[in-house]
């Protein structure tokens, strides 16, 4: 029996013509083929064929006489039996579908592992991050904002990047209130990395040699796990996203710059003649230096990333003059003439670490 999908009778396996014929007979005591054809708007031949199909489905019965007349079987029992058969067929089809799905998932699992890994726990993320980092030989690209995808334990440890690997990082400006962000940025740039800042990043992301990418499953819930993407098409798209963000980000540098003097008196920080107060650049030698208060600590951490006074003032919601005073005091205490020297000496004395606080 041909089933026309557009027919409302398709659900029970009837074509449109058979359905119209059955509708007519259900409202008539009986009728011959010619009368049925006129009522259904079809030819007598089409009516005869439809009536035979309905008879085969036990939906109509043939009455004796000449010409032959036809009557509908009781719809509840006749159509009900047909619907029961259709439901059984659909149930069997659903069973086949589930078996197909199981077979598909069994085969897709191994295939998908070559395209993407799911890391469910922080320890897995940290270990995989370290492994991918050490395996990189060309470049590592970061879009970084706290909380970190890899966790504080990796961010505060050694990077372990091979010599000659180019590192480019874009940090979200607001993230520099986070101590781990600052230390990671300082360490990366100290090892030859390039750093830029952006007011807002679309996602946390690390790309390794443009062959693998690490990103969180959910940006708002790092504990939900991370993904390692190996699909070439997806990695290429993520690399394009990084480059787009990189172009729009503001470059910063931690290199020593003569045009970044520490604000202060005519002689600047240091001795009265402008000479440097004794003490090595890493702050490990020289006289004892008092530790700074929490406000100076925050300002030094922000300054060490390359942020200028106006930006630091906006982040900490203080005046630019306040920022300059704290930088000047720190420079005088450290015997540093430039911001770069302040950053190095403060880091050497542990002033930039997250554990440093007022008076401790």
Image (cartoon, helix red, strand yellow):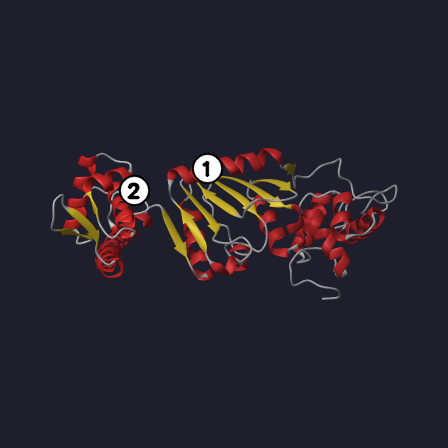
Q: Is residue 92 left or right of residue 65?
A: right
Position of residue 104 relative to residue 2, above or below, is below
Q: Mark 1 points at which residue?
A: 237
**Rendered residue at 76%/56% (across/down):** 296
Give the quarter of the image for residue 50. top left
Q: Name the residue under label 2.
A: 5
Q: How many marks?
A: 2
**Rendered residue at 29%/42% (across/down):** 5
The extreme bottom residue here reads 360
Q: Can residue 210 be seen in this view?
A: no
The quadrant in which the N terminus is found is top left
> In x, y percent, where is residue 127?
43, 57
> In x, y percent, where is residue 308?
74, 42
Q: Which of 276 and 86 is in front in this view?
A: 86
3D distance between C-alphas at marks 2 and 1: 42 Å
The extreme right residue here reads 266
């Amino acid at each position: 029996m041909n089933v026309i999908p557009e027919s409302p009778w398709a659900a029970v396996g009837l074509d449109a013509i058979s359905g119209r014929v059955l509708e007519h007979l259900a409202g008539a005591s009986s009728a011959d083929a010619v009368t049925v054809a006129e009522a259904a708007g079809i030819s007598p031949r089409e009516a005869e064929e439809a009536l035979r199909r309905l008879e085969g489905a036990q939906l109509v019965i043939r009455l004796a006489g000449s010409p032959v007349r036809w009557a509908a079987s009781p719809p509840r029992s006749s159509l009900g039996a047909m619907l029961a058969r259709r439901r059984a067929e659909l149930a069997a089809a659903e069973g086949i579908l589930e078996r197909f799905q199981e077979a598909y998932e069994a085969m897709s699992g191994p295939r998908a592992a070559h395209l993407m890994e799911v890391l469910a726990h922080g320890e897995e993320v940290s270990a995989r991050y370290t492994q991918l980092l050490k395996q990189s030989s060309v470049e590592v690209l970061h879009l970084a904002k706290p909380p970190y995808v890899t966790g504080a334990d990796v961010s505060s440890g050694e990077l372990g990047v091979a010599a000659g690997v180019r590192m480019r990082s874009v940090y979200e400006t607001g993230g520099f209130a986070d101590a781990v962000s600052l230390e990671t940025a300082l360490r990366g740039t100290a090892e030859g990395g390039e750093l830029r800042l952006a007011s807002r990043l679309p996602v946390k992301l690390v790309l390794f040699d443009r062959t693998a990418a690490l990103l969180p499953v959910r940006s708002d819930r790092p504990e939900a796990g991370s993904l390692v993407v190996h699909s070439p098409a997806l990695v290429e798209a993520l690399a394009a996203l990084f480059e787009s963000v990189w172009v729009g980000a503001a470059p910063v540098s931690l290199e020593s710059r003569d045009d970044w003097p520490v604000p202060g008196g005519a002689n600047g920080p240091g001795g009265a003649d402008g000479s440097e107060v004794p003490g090595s650049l890493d702050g490990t030698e020289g006289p004892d230096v008092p530790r700074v208060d929490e406000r100076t600590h925050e300002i030094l951490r922000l300054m060490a990333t390359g942020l200028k006074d106006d930006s630091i003032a906006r982040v900490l919601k203080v005046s630019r003059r306040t920022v300059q005073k704290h930088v000047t005091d720190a420079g005088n205490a450290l015997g540093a003439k430039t911001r770069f020297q302040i950053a190095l000496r403060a880091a050497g004395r542990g002033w930039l670490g997250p554990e440093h606080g007022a008076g401790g």
